[in-house]
Image: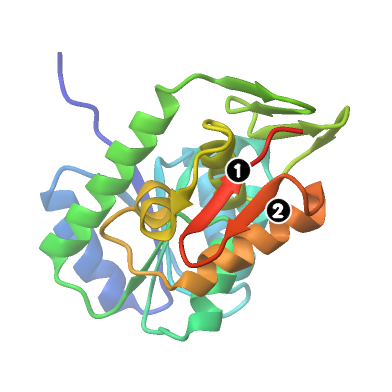
Amino acid sequence: MAEKTFKILVVDDEPDILEFLSYNLEKEGFQVETAENGKQALEKAKKSQPDIVLLDVMMPEMDGIEACRTMREMPQFEHTIIAFLTARTEDYSQIAGFETGADDYISKPIKPRVLVSRLKALLRRYEAKESKSTHLEVGNIQIDRERYLITFEGKEMAVPRKEFELLYLLASKPGKVFKRDEILNEIWGRDIIVGDRTIDVHIRKLREKLGEDLIKTVKGIGYKFEEQ
């Protein structure tokens, strides 16, 4: 069986970077399409349905954060891998990226071989997650992986992708204390460097939607899901 060719949309307002990335990604077997801003990226993505979108943050017309947020609100991009490739490394910018539903936040400059490795790791992790059970029911909460939908106390709600995956992880083993490192590795991957604050922000967002009782903090260790 022939190996699948993955489609990637690379979005950056600098032509030299687009050319450099396209050359190196095509050399590694990716089918590459490019866009110069977020607005153009949305138009092209609707037509080509890429497997991966690689976004710069600072761009004219529509920046990467807004483009990612808009894509995640559209059902056809729920399962698309979205990664930022940017020179901005501030914590608040990284957290904003993950809050809009990004799967990775990669800092420039990066060697092409390392970038390809990161992208392939994202694809492997996504495929592994897709092979898991598609439905989980614990107490008064149901989690549907196929639709990325949570039903809580009879009310359906959609949440950003990382929040969804974090809740699914914790709820998959009620009562188990997940250490912070374990959460980072499972949700963001070993190749992605994010701070503890990123986990805390996502936990806070989930508590705002589901109440304070479902996810408990185990001081100095991590978090656990308590079945109600």
Name the residue: 24% across, 33% down.
5
Instruction: Identify the residue position indicated by label 2 in the image.
Output: 206
Secondary structure at badge 1 equals helix
- Estimate how packed mark 1 is, as few (under 14), some (14 to 19) or many (20 or more) residues with alpha carbons within 10 Å: many
The colouring scheme, among rainbow, by chain, secondary structure or one colour, is: rainbow
In the rendered image, the vertical position of residue 66 relative to residue 144, given as above or below:
below
Q: Nearer the viewer, residue 25 or 84?
A: 84
Q: Is residue 152 left or right of residue 76?
A: right
What is the three-letter code of the residue carrying label 2?
Leu
For the point 33% across and 40% down, which residue is it? 125
Task: Farthest residue to the front: give it.
Answer: 219
Residue sticking out furthest to the top:
1
| Quadrant of the rendering where the N terminus is positioned | top left
What kind of element bears circle 2?
helix
Residue 78: x, y in percent? 58, 39
The x and y percentages for residue 50 are 43, 42
Q: Is 112 placed left or right of 143 in the picture?
A: left
Residue at the spot of label 1:
167
Does 59 sit left or right of 164 as displayed?
left
The location of residue 105, given as percent across then percent down, is 40, 67
Indicate the position of residue 202 as horizontal and vertical percent values: 61, 60
Relative placement, left or right, of 189 versus 99 is left
**Alpha-carbon distance for marks 1 and 2?**
8 Å
Circles 1 and 2 in contact, beta carbons < 8 Å: yes
Say which of 78 and 200 sits in front: 200
